[in-house]
Amino acid sequence: MTESEIESGNVARYCKPSSLENGVPDKSAFEKRKGEQYLSVYRLEFFQKQTEKENIAEVRNYMEKKIRFNCKSNGSFAVLNIEQSKEYILEELSEIISYKEEGLPHCGLYHNTDDFLIAELLTECVQNNYFVKDIVDPNIPPSLPS
């Protein structure tokens, strides 16, 4: 697959319940797993819905139906603005991060810097946070409690 860089828009990252502190994503929500080259996120504009929340519902639907990922009801979706997060990381660390297509709506957030530092800064870039239990879609059955 050809990786095409995404310069603008918004992405969502699913945050498991254990990566939330008082309902807010902590840095563990933005750490790459061992061996991963990028952090998985989903491009919201791909779905072209009218509201951010409707796009989040589409991300949840995609994850649960297409990739068979179980989003826990007390997990959340954190929204990052691509331009703002890139500028913030550059300003704070003088490092470049990039967002690349990985089979849209799936994208990768790439960086070559200390993962813990980037993860901490990304928590400060969260624009909105939607709890899975609050994302209502008549086509999605309720999630199991974790």
Image (tube, helix red, strand yellow):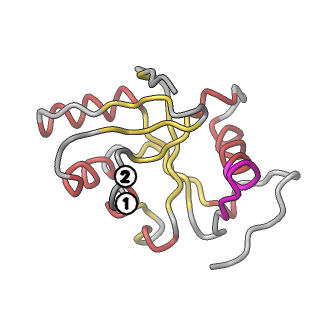
Locate residue 146 relative to residue 31 in the image: left or right. right
Dot 1 lies on which element?
loop
Tell me the CA gap for discs 2 and 1. Answer: 6 Å
Give the image location of residue 26, x and y in percent: 35, 63
Write down the region rendered in magenta.
Answer: 63-70
Check the image and report above or below for 20 versus 92: below
Q: Residue 33 carries which label?
A: 1
Give the image location of residue 98, x and y in percent: 33, 30
Locate residue 53 relative to residue 124 in the image: left or right. right
Give the image location of residue 21, x and y in percent: 40, 71
Residue 108, magenta (yes or no): no
Give the image location of residue 13, x and y in percent: 50, 49
Check the image and report above or below for 91 versus 142: above
Q: Extreme front residue here?
A: 1
Q: How many labels does the image show?
A: 2
Amino acid bearing label 2: Glu
Locate residue 105 relative to residue 61 in the image: left or right. left
Residue at figure coordinates x 15%, y 32% from the top left = 91
Residue at figure coordinates x 44%, y 23% from the top left = 6
Q: Extreme right residue here?
A: 138
Residue position for label 2 = 36
- Mark 2 is surrounded, within 10 Å at the Cα level, by few (under 14), some (14 to 19) or many (20 or more) other residues, namely few
Locate residue 119 relative to residue 67 in the image: left or right. left
Q: Are marks 2 and 1 in contact (CB under 8 Å)?
A: yes
